[in-house]
Amino acid sequence: MRKNLKHLHYPRALKIKRKPIQNQIPGKITYVGEETSAETIINVISYNEEKVIYHNNCPIEKVHDLVTHEKEFKHWINFIGVHDVEKLSELGTMLNIHPLILEDIANTKQRPKLDEFEDYVFFALKMIFHNDAGLLIKNHFGIVFNSSYIISFQQSQDVVFNSIRERIHNKVGRIRVRGTDYLFYALIDAVVDNYYNVTEAIEEKTENLEDRILIDANNASTSEIQLLKREILSVRKSVFPAKELIRKLQISKHVLYDNSTKAYIADLYDHILQVTENVDIYREIVWGLMDMYMSSLSNKMNQVMKVLTIMSTIFIPLTFIAGIYGMNFEYMPELDYRPAYFIVMGLMFLLTLGLIYYFRKKKWF
């Protein structure tokens, strides 16, 4: 069912100052992204089947102690603020994460990717959502996990993973009794589920814009169509690479993936496949909106031109008659005839009515 018609605001993308990515030394951790002064926060949730312990604003040394000495727990380390390359490098060195992986984490322009090492796995994708102004926001998100802990790297604080935190806290579902590979799946699943929210918002924008064009093309503009087209392309650039990576996860033989978790990853692949299909559908619709918009304007212009043409056609014979009797010949026979004026005016009136009747019969208007 169509949503109620409303005028949506399509804000222009802001020009964001980013650090350059050219001429970087391979393996050197350099932040590439929007400049920010936000504080980097490391929160750790240590959990097992019986207990959950929260460690907020955790120093890196304590993180190392937790993953080294508290083996009875699985640890979810949430690193918020990848712009702090010093802390990122320190954490990576302490937990033996490859410098190239850390470089990809700090580069928010990095496309989604999957790297599988002997004892850990790295997965990067984009977290996308709309802010309060309706502007599409893309945040870089990376995961490193092994058999005892999982590290999620984010640009900023989020609400996407609140449901997972609640499931851990309230012991809902299988997350407390399963390994880190299941938490790894759950985090990716939460990001993909959020893709649905984005595509639903795009669907609403697309349908409203389409309805406005159908009702009156003057209610829309080419800039709105172009901004929506750009938004869909931006979503597509994030979603389609993630689909291929989830497919790789599904067929991977890495020892960190439990066979029971593979079934959930297969279901996750079905979800993102549906998202990509929806994005392609909206992409095709928006591509057609420009043609619809131009056709609607052209049809409206044709209607105007048809009315003007009909009016001109009606006045052509009237102008002809008026032109004849406006000539300054001295011996025109009708000039001395007393009722000639009324006869000519009546003839003009009848001629006008006759032309209007003819045009209506031909269904020209």
Image (cartoon, grey):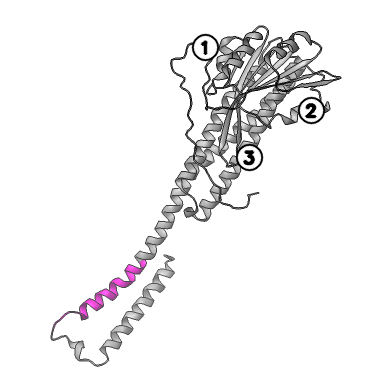
As drawn, which residue projects farthest toward the left?
330
- Foreground disc of the pair 3, 2: 2
Number of numbered discs overlaid on the protein picture: 3
Name the foreground residue: 84 vs 345.
Answer: 84
Which percent across, then down, holds residue 99? 57, 10
Q: Earlier in the sequence, mark 3 or mark 2?
A: 2
Task: Tell me if I can see residue 172 in this picture.
Answer: no
Label annotation for residue 167: 2
Query: Which element carries disc 3, helix, strand or loop?
Result: helix
Classified by dominant secondary structure, the portion drawn in magenta counts as helix
Which percent across, then down, holds residue 237? 54, 28
- Neighbour tally class for label 1: few under 14, some 14-19, many 20 plus, Cα within 10 Å: some
Q: Are marks 2 and 1 in contact (CB under 8 Å)?
A: no
Name the foreground residue: 243 vs 168.
Answer: 168
Which percent across, then down, holds residue 320? 25, 74
Give the magenta range: 310-329
Residue 328 colored in magenta in the image: yes
- Neighbour tally class for label 3: few under 14, some 14-19, many 20 plus, Cα within 10 Å: some
Provide the residue designation for mark 1: 28
